[in-house]
Image: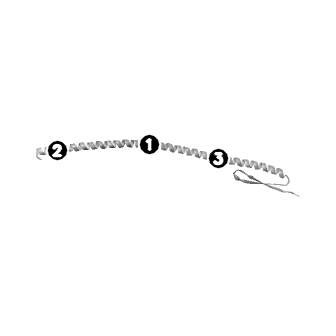
Amino acid sequence: MLTLAVSAFYCLGAGGRTTTFVACNKTNNAFIMSELKEASDRLEQAIERLDRALANGRQTAEDARSLAMAGTIAAVERERDSLRADLDALRLERAQLAQALADARERQAAARQANEAVAERLDDAIGSLRAILGV
């Protein structure tokens, strides 16, 4: 009589994956089961190494994104600092121009008063000359 042995072996790997191995043998069931166990162990170790490599790859990608983001943040901060310096310089220039405008307005007001005084004297002189000439 021919005996057929069928064995199933379940392996729970990293990440919760379940792998099923089935072994069929007519005679040497114990030998096949030990070979199957060794293969299963090697497969589980390989899966764990792949999971670690995948996690490291994700971490490396995250690190690269973090470095890129840090570079972008540093560039934005440099630009912000440059713009602040420009703004401070423009505020100083505006204050200087406002003072120059105020000084010019004062000089214009003084010149207007002097002009009005001269115009009044000229009008008086013209009036005196007309009175003398009888015009």
Residue 129 point in image, percent of width and height: 13, 44
Residue found at x 15% / y 45%: 127
- Marks 3,1: beta carbons within 8 A: no
* Residue closest to the far right: 1
Q: Of callouts 2 and 1, which one flags the residue occurring earlier in the amino acid sequence?
A: 1
The residue lying at 30 percent from left, 44 percent from top is 105
Residue that carries the numbered disc 2 in the rendered image: 124
Decide if residue 81 is on the left or right side of residue 30: left
Label disc, if present, on residue 100 of the rendered structure? none
The CA span between labels 2 and 1 is: 56 Å
Separation (CA) of disc 3 from disc 1: 43 Å
**Residue, disc 1:** 86
Q: What residue type is disc 1 on?
A: Asp
CA distance separating discs 3 and 2: 99 Å
Left or right position of 50 against 106: right
**Residue receiving disc 3:** 57
x then y, percent, for residue 35: 80, 49
| Element marked by disc 2 | helix
Q: Position of residue 125 (x, y in %)?
A: 16, 43
In the rendered view, tell whether residue 125 sits above or below residue 21: above
* Neighbourhood count class around disc 2 (C-alpha, 10 Å): few under 14, some 14–19, many 20 upward: few
> Circle 3 — which element?
helix
Does residue 70 appear left or right of residue 10 in this picture?
Answer: left
Nearest to viewer (mark 3 / mark 2): 2
